[in-house]
Amino acid sequence: PGLIVVFLILGIYFLDASKPNEIPERLKVQSLLNERAHIESLFKKNSPQEAYNIFKNENTKRTVAEQHTAAHLFGEILYEREGVAGFSVCDGDFGFGCFHTFISFAIAEKGDGVVRELDQACVDKYGKKGLWCSHGIGHGLLAYYGYTNKGLERSLSVCKTLALKHPYGGCQDGVFMEYNFRTMELDSKNRGRPFSFDSRMEPCTNVPESFLLSCYFAQPAWWLQTFHEEPGAVVRAGNYCAEIESVDFKQACFRGIGYAKSPDLEFDALRGITLCDSMPVSSSQRLSCREGYAWALYADPTFRDKAKLVCSEGLSSAEATECQKEYLFFVQ
């Protein structure tokens, strides 16, 4: 099972959406296996919580992508050693990477019956705003049920039963992200959903309306990954968002652009502002992009204090208030 995480380095939540295949040299296969051995050694000498604390301290100066990938490894090993009981050790650091593999491996081993147990553990530890927990559950569900329309439908139906039901960032978002990127697919030939112009809005054309906010929020990450070598990738994604007829779904899509670009810009507030403000779209759509970027920063405790700047710098009082209300749903 140690090799499985090698196939997860595309990332489940906060890896660079615009350059998903550019793996840092030190984190290629042999380095990953060496790192796995090091993490296992931490468990031999320390309690799971102590091992995690040491692990985080050792990784503070690495890049966002490296941290997140290493946290995937830690989550896998934690589950192997402690089972579901080790769930409370994970937290939101390093893009919630510990949760992603932990939850996904739990579902793969125990089936969807473990979801209720994991969801309750999320609520017990983080309250009903533990987005990263339910997001990881979404990834695990889709991988468990399969990358088909039926698997998508079954996964989303389970998401509706979880404590957190917000369309952004939670279980639904994890399901759609896994459907598009297929990060848990072990066959490298099947990893990543192929893009075609005619299918650019799928699967949003095939799911019930109640899931469309989540679906359109998730689409830009897939588009941006597809066009990552094109200088006009963000503009192209914006053009696709503009095609959506519903005002609400269009807004979700532009928010998804800001959200998806945050890892690429290393969660830098000013770079996010520049990106969104430079888009050749309406002021309301640029504001939606900012809201998505601010949400990405606020959702991760490491970058939370930068979110307010994204929703204030260069904005009118009314715009700033609207922007801050959007990302602050997280604590309301």
Image (tube, rainbow, N blue to C red):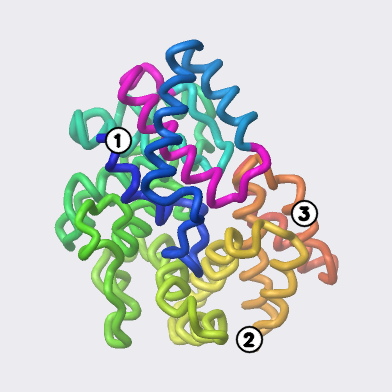
Nearest the viewer among 142 and 96 is 96
Nearest the viewer among 65 and 210 is 65
Instruction: Write the residue at 35% across / 28% down.
Output: 118
Say which label, 3 or 2, has the lower sequence index: 2
Q: Main secondary structure of the magenta part?
A: helix
Query: Whole-percent x and y of residue 206?
Result: 24, 70
User: Magenta stretch?
Assistant: 60-87
Nearest the viewer among 87 and 151 is 87
Identify which amino acid the numbered label 1 is placed on: Gly
Q: Is residue 67 magenta?
A: yes
The answer to which image quadrant residue 108 occupies is top left
At label 3, counting other C-alpha atoms closer than 10 Å, the crowd grade (few under 14, some 14-19, many 20 or more) is some
Instruction: Write the residue at 58% across / 59% down.
Output: 263
At label 2, counting other C-alpha atoms closer than 10 Å, the crowd grade (few under 14, some 14-19, many 20 or more) is some
Query: Whole-percent x and y of residue 250?
Result: 50, 76
Identify which amino acid the numbered label 3 is placed on: Lys
**The disc label shown at residue 108, or none:** none
Say which label, 2 or 1, has the lower sequence index: 1
Asked if residue 203 is positioned above or below residue 151 in the image, the reply reads below
Instruction: Write the residue at 40% across / 19% down.
Output: 86
**The disc label shown at residue 2, or none:** 1
Whole-number angstrom distance, CA of label 2 to CA of label 1: 46 Å
Quadrant occupied by the N terminus: top left
Left or right of 272 on screen, residue 141: left
**The disc label shown at residue 308, or none:** 3
Query: Whole-percent x and y of residue 113?
Result: 21, 30
Whole-number angstrom distance, CA of label 1 to CA of label 3: 40 Å
Q: Which residue is mark 2?
A: 281
Query: Whole-percent x and y of residue 160?
Result: 32, 45
Identify which amino acid the numbered label 2 is placed on: Val
Q: Is residue 124 magenta?
A: no
Left or right of 209 on screen, residue 143: left
